[in-house]
Image: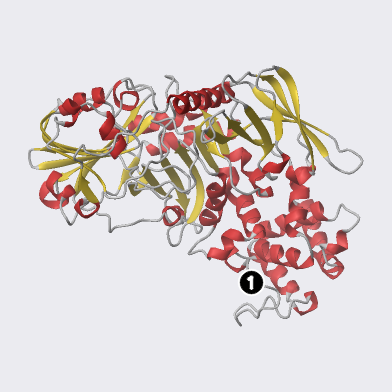
């Protein structure tokens, strides 16, 4: 049923299937690492495999973000975006993709899904949809997680099993504290409507599936009676486990973290025949637990699954929901689960789950003899203060004001709104994540301000993504997170300056030109490297050796929209005094021919 030897890569799941191209996508996550999100457009913009060096190439990242960012929307719990280790100017381009939301019932926004749509560039085949249901967030965590990937095409029949999931997707824009653009609101409604008609291809041995969403309309989850039951959940509460165990004749297995099992009452643990943990279980950040000490190397159990045996069938329920009150009973959290039903003879059951060929090889018996940590009251108080401050900042009505440019070409950036007091926080600093934390400005946590200057920055560094660093009197308790704040006065020159900064010189321009004329797969080839005879584009790196006339003519005949993109880039790059340092004069002479052709074509339209 579930084997630790069957692995799947997040990036593989995001890569378009052969013969298809990316159209649009909606993702939901509790926490988000901007560095991880930065690589997603590269995978979606490619038609095939990806070179590792492409993920470190600013020009390739810039172009892939430009191509697809308008069609990707990521909804996450407000206040749970991670502060990246290193700055990157390209983070600013992620702003429109990211929508901070809150759970309507006061819990946390916790679902982890991707709904993607791919299309056939020839138009012969109908669009293909891919749904990924995960237990992991959009971060670099290396914990033990589960994922389910489904693919299908839309039909004419309404699929009742997808009703609740469709309702959640349609409601996503309404969960944001700030207005969501009409385009992204329409996207949510469009994909929600299409989702309700998708006929999913079922995994081997699975006869049916159904989606469950908590925290939007549904208030509690009570599984149908079962003969046997197994639960995998890193976070649990006594009340939720008693509720679940009451639905089964034999609550057989509970797999969790040692710390969670120690916190349960002996009576709750005794409800299950066996309590198991991972051999090397380690804590991992999740919406169920206050974890103010941020870890970049999270490990351990993070998967969530519920296995029920009913007659000849096995019901495997997996997704984002832990066995806690907030997730399953009060439904304060927004959660997504999917139930797969199949014959036990084909997909296994509770015994096969913990057998050697299942998860048995990585599990160990919980004996209850583990050392119970001594409660540090000072640490506990500091953790509560950090979590409270995070929520206060996340719920504060804050924005940014941008003013300039000033004589040296820089722009002033300031936090606006009523900055709240943060009890228990000894130091609070803030900075745009496009620059290093050394630029952080200390914010007085005991006073209220209507505007706080963050400093002066180049146009390319301007962003609404602001990192906050919270410290307490306890040396080990702190937190860093990012808010996506609305910006007033963002200059149109921001993206132009960003383009110039990334492209940098003539070699960079020629590489970017290749991206616009062809594909991302050739983006990292140096100009001095000989390409294959099939294209012969690079030559010796001299523009006079490059068959630009042929390539531009071919693009005009086969894909004139690419020439329009080149025209757009040239206009943005040639408005400065040092144009020749980036755009070769020889190219501008050649380009004038196509500029005239495009203008002529425009007059005949």
Position of 211 with respect to 574 (left or right) is left
Relative image position of residue 158 (x, y in whole percent)? 32, 35
* Quarter residue 302 falls in: top left
Q: Nearer the viewer, residue 63 or 536?
A: 63
Hey, which residue is sitting farthest bottom in the picture? 533
Q: Residue at x 63, y 21 (%)?
A: 397
Q: Nearer the viewer, residue 329 or 176?
A: 329
Q: Which residue is mark 1?
A: 525
Q: Secondary structure at mark 1?
A: loop
Q: Is residue 274 visible?
A: yes
Q: Is residue 158 visible?
A: no
Relative image position of residue 301 (x, y in whole percent)? 33, 44
Q: Is residue 55 above or below residue 315?
A: below
Question: How many dots with numbers?
Answer: 1
Q: Residue at x 64, y 45 (%)?
A: 91
Q: Is residue 537 above or below residue 86?
A: below
Relative image position of residue 139 (x, y in whole percent)? 48, 45
Q: Residue at x 7, y 38 (%)?
A: 311
Q: Nearer the viewer, residue 158 or 171?
A: 171
* Quarter residue 442 falls in: top right
Q: Is residue 146 above or below residue 488?
A: below
Relative image position of residue 262 (x, y in whole percent)? 26, 33
């Amino acid at each position: 049923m579930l084997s630790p030897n069957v692995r799947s890569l997040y990036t593989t799941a995001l890569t378009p299937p052969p013969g298809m191209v990316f159209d649009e996508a909606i993702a939901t996550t509790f926490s988000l690492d901007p560095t991880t999100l930065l690589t997603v457009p590269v995978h979606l913009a490619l038609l095939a495999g990806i070179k590792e060096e492409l993920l470190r190439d600013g020009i390739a990242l810039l172009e892939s973000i430009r191509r697809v960012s308008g069609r990707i929307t990521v909804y996450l719990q407000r206040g749970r975006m991670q502060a990246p280790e290193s700055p990157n100017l390209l983070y600013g381009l992620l702003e429109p993709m990211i929508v901070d939301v809150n759970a309507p019932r006061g819990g946390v926004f916790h679902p982890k899904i991707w709904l993607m749509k791919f299309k056939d560039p020839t138009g012969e085949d109908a669009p293909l949809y891919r749904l990924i249901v995960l237990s992991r967030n959009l971060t670099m965590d290396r914990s033990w997680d589960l994922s389910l990937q489904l693919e299908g095409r839309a039909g004419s029949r309404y699929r009742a099993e997808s009703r609740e999931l469709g309702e959640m997707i349609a409601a996503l824009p309404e969960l944001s504290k700030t207005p969501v653009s009409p385009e992204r609101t329409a996207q949510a409604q469009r994909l929600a409507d299409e989702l309700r008609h998708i006929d999913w291809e079922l995994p081997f041995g699975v006869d049916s599936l159904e989606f469950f969403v908590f925290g939007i309309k549904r208030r509690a989850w009570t599984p149908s009676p079962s003969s046997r039951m197994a639960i995998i959940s890193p976070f649990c509460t006594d009340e939720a486990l008693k509720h679940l165990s009451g639905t089964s004749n034999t609550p057989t297995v509970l797999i969790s973290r040692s710390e969670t099992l120690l916190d349960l009452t002996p009576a709750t643990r005794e409800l299950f025949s066996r309590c198991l943990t991972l051999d090397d279980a380690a804590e991992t950040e999740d919406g169920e637990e206050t974890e103010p000490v941020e870890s970049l190397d999270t490990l351990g159990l993070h998967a969530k699954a519920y296995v029920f045996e009913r007659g000849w069938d096995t019901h495997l329920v997996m997704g984002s929901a832990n066995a806690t009150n907030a997730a399953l009973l009060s439904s304060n959290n927004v959660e997504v689960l999917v139930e797969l039903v199949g014959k036990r003879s084909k997909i296994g059951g509770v015994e096969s789950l913990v057998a050697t060929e299942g998860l048995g090889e990585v599990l160990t018996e919980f004996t209850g003899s583990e050392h119970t940590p001594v409660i540090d009251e000072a640490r506990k108080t500091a953790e509560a203060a950090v979590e409270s401050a995070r929520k206060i900042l996340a719920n504060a009505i804050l924005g940014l004001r941008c003013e300039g440019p000033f004589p040296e070409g820089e722009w002033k950036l300031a936090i606006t709104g009523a900055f709240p007091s943060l009890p228990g926080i000894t130091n609070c600093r803030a900075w745009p994540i496009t620059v290093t934390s050394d630029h952080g400005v200390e914010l007085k946590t005991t006073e209220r301000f209507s505007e706080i200057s963050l400093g002066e920055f180049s146009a390319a560094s301007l962003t609404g993504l602001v990192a906050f660093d919270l410290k307490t009197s306890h040396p080990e308790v702190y937190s860093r997170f990012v808010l996506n704040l609305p910006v007033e006065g963002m200059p149109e020159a921001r993206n132009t300056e960003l383009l110039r900064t990334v492209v940098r010189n003539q070699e960079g321009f020629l590489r970017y030109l290749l991206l616009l004329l062809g594909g991302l797969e050739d983006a990292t080839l140096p100009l001095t490297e000989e390409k294959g005879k099939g294209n012969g584009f690079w030559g010796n790196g001299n523009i006079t050796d490059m068959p630009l006339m042929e390539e531009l003519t071919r693009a005009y005949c086969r894909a004139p929209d690419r020439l329009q993109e080149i025209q757009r880039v040239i206009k943005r790059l040639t408005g400065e005094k040092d144009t020749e340092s980036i755009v070769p004069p020889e190219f501008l002479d050649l380009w004038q021919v196509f500029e005239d052709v495009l203008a002529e074509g425009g007059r005949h339209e």
